Amino acid sequence: MNFDLSEEQRMLADAVGKLFEAQAEDANVDSHKLWNGYLELGLLGLPFAEEQGGFGGGQEEIMLVMEAYGRTLGTAPYLQSVLMAGRLLALVDGGTASDALSGLLDGSQKYALCLFEPDTRYRWHEPGTKAERSDAGWTLSGEKRAVLNAETDTHLICPATTPEGFGLFLIPPGASGLSLRERPTPDGRIAADIVLDGVEIAEAAAIGDPANNGALVAKIVDGAILACCSEAIGAMEKLLALTVEYLGTRNQFGAPIGSFQVLQHRAADMLIALEQTRSMTIHAISMMDAPPTQRHVAVAAAKALTNRASRFVGSQAIQLHGGMGLASEYPAGRYFQRLTVLENMFGDSNHHLTEMEKGGGLAAAL
Amino acid sequence: MELTFTEGERRFRAEVREYLLSNISENIRQSVYEERPLPREWQVESQQILNRAGYAVPHWPVEWGGRDWSAVKRTILVQEIDQNSVPRPLPFNAALVGPVVAAFGTEEQKRRFLAPVANLDMWFCQGFSEPNAGSDLASLKTSAVREGAHYQVNGQKIWTTAAHKADWIFCLVRTAQCERKQQGISFLLIDLATPGITIRPIPTIDGFHHVNEVYFDDVRVPAENLVGEEGRGWDYAKYLLGQERTSLGNIGFSQRRLDRVRALAKARRGEAGPLIDDPDFRRRLSWAEIELKALEITQMRVVASAGNPAGGADPKTSILKIKGSEILQDAAELLLDTLGPEALTAGFADSLASDDSQGLDAHSSVLSAYFTSRKYSIFGGSNEIQRNILAKAVLGLGSKR
Ligand SMILES: Cc1cc2nc3c(=O)[nH]c(=O)nc-3n(C[C@H](O)[C@H](O)[C@H](O)COP(=O)(O)OP(=O)(O)OC[C@H]3O[C@@H](n4cnc5c(N)ncnc54)[C@H](O)[C@@H]3O)c2cc1C
């Protein structure tokens, strides 16, 4: 075992850190400029094989990118478009998917994978959305919830139940019968509730194999969950640093509040929660190529722990800042908001503990 | 990064396990699994078997019986020892006094002590704490006054684990009154058979006898038993406490306890169906499993980064101590709760009973494990002291002035 970054990984972490920091400080940045920065640094192709036009990065490299993203409160649709939709497109066969992937890689198109629905909470496996054959191809009807970064120009990948099983359908922006209700999330991003009211799409828009799509999406989702864990780790790291800095500079009772032992111990507990989360995420990353049940148990365990740590570190950072923690202008609150969004994504602790237990627990996954 | 074990590391693990299972007797392993008191001769027998394979003191210098194994391998070794219910090499010998003698002792002291200490032919106990010097260890008062070729030692040590089984004690003693209390402390090896030493048991809430008070009344200790320089004992003590970090997280031990929890909970009824399927119970077990798996990686991160000795103490060491003790305590609570009403009539030990098992059986040992587990967050730097270290040394939070 060896936890040191390789030379290339160090360079990647460095370059990504610099880019994201510059973007975070740039007052005039728009979504186009943001995405262009990602494209120029090679981040759009990072997780794809070289044959597919990518750079062959793995989950470790994604961890480095997402930690930096979390530290700088990134807003670009990297998780959604590249790590979820993009990696799914790379896994399914067929011309439609590979055309879509090229559009993503050259920066001209953005994608979103629409997983969650009103009635199924975090269980995306059996979509209530239905796809039926029509003269032209397929008709889709149903609803999707809280699709991060889905905007009017985003290409959607919609899971839907078909007579053959778990279908995956590519829906172009502006398809008739498609409506998006975009809402701001508490952490400065956009998520959309989507209605599919008899959306007509071509035969070729069905991608993948209904017998196998569910397993592919499961793998993509596990990878995305780990990306969220890494993002949360970056956010917690920065939030703890902000808090420690505040403890050293804010004076009350004639002393820096960081000299009070009760606050010192709280900060120590925040550090412990962060480091344990980092360790568990490293473990889950090392399990990404294990058989699906073992992989999923490790990922679920990592998300459950990340969620608990995020809530603890987030809420205690606010507490230690006093009233300043409540001010939305001050960064601590923004990190807490981001952590809260991440906690909700892909499932709360209860959901992930249940998943872990269904898989026999961590002891069974050794 | 290499986030999984290498082929060589996996082979090493299998080799260790094979050796332990085929050489350490079933009786001994059963007793450790059930956390019953271990007769002295079993501890000795077991350490000698480990020592033959280089497993007792692998972190020592090679010329004194150490092996040139990576810290990751040594961590695997400790985990296997714990997980397979093999008694650990006596920590006072292997982890504490040995490395200090090897680093600061004279050639004569190394020749005299190291081999028997590794082989547990000589049993050491640790005389650091005193009635008024616990967390604030540097305020210790036990005095050693130089008189010709001897030191005259007077004072009292407390909480001395296994002093009643030991042959020798290594002590921090005061040889001079200095401005700073950390100065004027010396590191002395004392033969417990020397006249003037009295050992009194302190029965503990777990029903065991493992700790003692040790009184020194005009005890004459040959000056050649001083380790290193007079007055530098505090530095040596710091060196010693920073030594072997591979076992700090108690990973294998907690794994063993959780295995036992699972085994007991499968065989017992809960509110509806087997206890292991009770949602609340299962949830507590899941959290313990998660924290433990995370700590196992934290443990590996600490030792893997400790590769270069110049690196100094890794601040994450305190995390190992805090989380490791908390998980052991959680596991002990789960064990106790698993027994249900059986716990009350499981029987309880008589800590001063003369028989080796002190009257404990497999059941009552669950209760003992529960009570004794409170110690893990107290000794070796309490969890509050560890949090002070994290806050000050890692996060850089200051004191009042
Ligand atoms: C089972 C057992 C075996 C032991 N074996 C040995 C042995 O073999 N050899 C040996 O030398 N010693 C041994 N010890 C002693 C052990 O190292 C001490 O108990 C420990 O150092 C704590 O000291 P104390 O008991 O005097 O508690 P105190 O130092 O009095 O602490 C009491 C409480 O105050 C807290 N506290 C103290 N200072 C601070 C501070 N600055 N900030 C916040 N909180 C603080 C502590 O965390 C604790 O909660 C053993 C102890 C036990 C329980």
Image: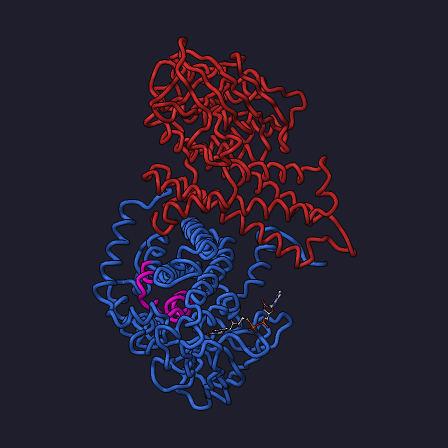
Q: Main secondary structure of the magenta part?
A: helix
> Is residue A95 covered in magenta?
no
Q: Position of residue B17 (x, y in %)?
A: 26, 58
Residue drawn 53% across the image and 16% down it = A178
x and y percentages locating residue A268 in the rendered image: 59, 54
Q: Which of B164 and A8 lies nearest the eye of the viewer?
A: B164
Is A243 situated left or right of A10 in this image? right
- Residue drawn at (52%, 53%), measured in percent from left and top? B315
- The chain shown in red is which? A
**x then y, percent, for residue B48:** 27, 71
Name the image quarter holding residue B389: bottom right
The coloring applied to the image is by chain
Towards the viewer: B191 or B84: B84
**Chain B color in figure:** blue
Left or right of A191 in this view: A305: left
The foreground one among B9 and A225 is: A225
Segment tinted magenta in the rendering: B80-105
Q: Point out the residue furthest to the left here.
A: B22
In the image, residue B338 sits, relative to residue B354, either above or below, namely above
Vertically, is A313 above or below B334?
Answer: above
Residue B312 against residue A19 in the figure, above or below: below
Residue B197 seen in the current view: yes
Q: Does the magenta stretch include residue B90?
A: yes
Q: Quick check: A253 left or right of A28?
A: right
Q: Is residue B309 visible?
A: no
Q: In which quarter of the image is ligand 1?
A: bottom right
Q: Where is residue B343 in the image (x, y as percent from the top left)?
A: 43, 72
